Image (cartoon, grey):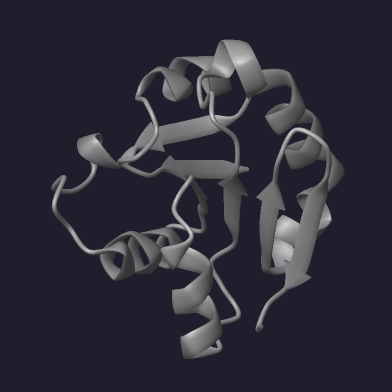
Amino acid sequence: MKIIIDMNLSPIWVAYFLENGVEAQHWSSVGNSNDPDVAILNWANQNQAIVFTNDLDFGAILAASQAKSPSVFQVRTQDLLPQAIGEIVLENLRKFTPELESGALISLDLNRAKIRILPI
């Protein structure tokens, strides 16, 4: 599993994912901070990566384009740091690996995960 972390999440997620066996890069190491969300989706698609974000726009873009990939994993909570939500993020990444590998939009808050298979 490979993850590209959106600009709206801290780069400290990279180390957290790597320490837990998940390949990850922050968008700031790949592209420009002002790149549109579509650029991140295109990069993720070309590099077979999952977009990890807090931004709802990715789901809207996937729905409007009827894209089958890439997968997007959205976290919907106030505290977005790994020390607060890291365990639940990893748990759900592992739980939904098959869906993420085939194309899905996952929205996670502290109480539940909502999954939509692509295209939506």
* Nearer to the camera, 45 or 56: 56
Q: Quadrant of the N terminus?
A: top right
Residue visible at 35% across and 69% down in the picture: 42
Q: Quadrant of residue 104?
A: bottom right
Q: Quadrant of the C terminus?
A: bottom right
Q: Is residue 20 visible?
A: no
Residue visible at 79% across and 57% down in the picture: 114
* Nearer to the camera, 101 or 77: 77
Q: Classify 6 as above or below 69.
A: above
Q: How many marks?
A: 0
Q: Classify 57 as above or below 5.
A: below
Is 99 on the left or on the right of 19, as rendered? right
Is 66 on the left or on the right of 98, as rendered? left
Residue 103 appears at what percent x and percent y? 67, 68
Is 41 on the left or on the right of 72, as rendered? left
Residue visible at 44% across and 53% down in the picture: 55
Residue visible at 60% across and 29% down in the picture: 22
Is 86 on the left or on the right of 94, as rendered? left
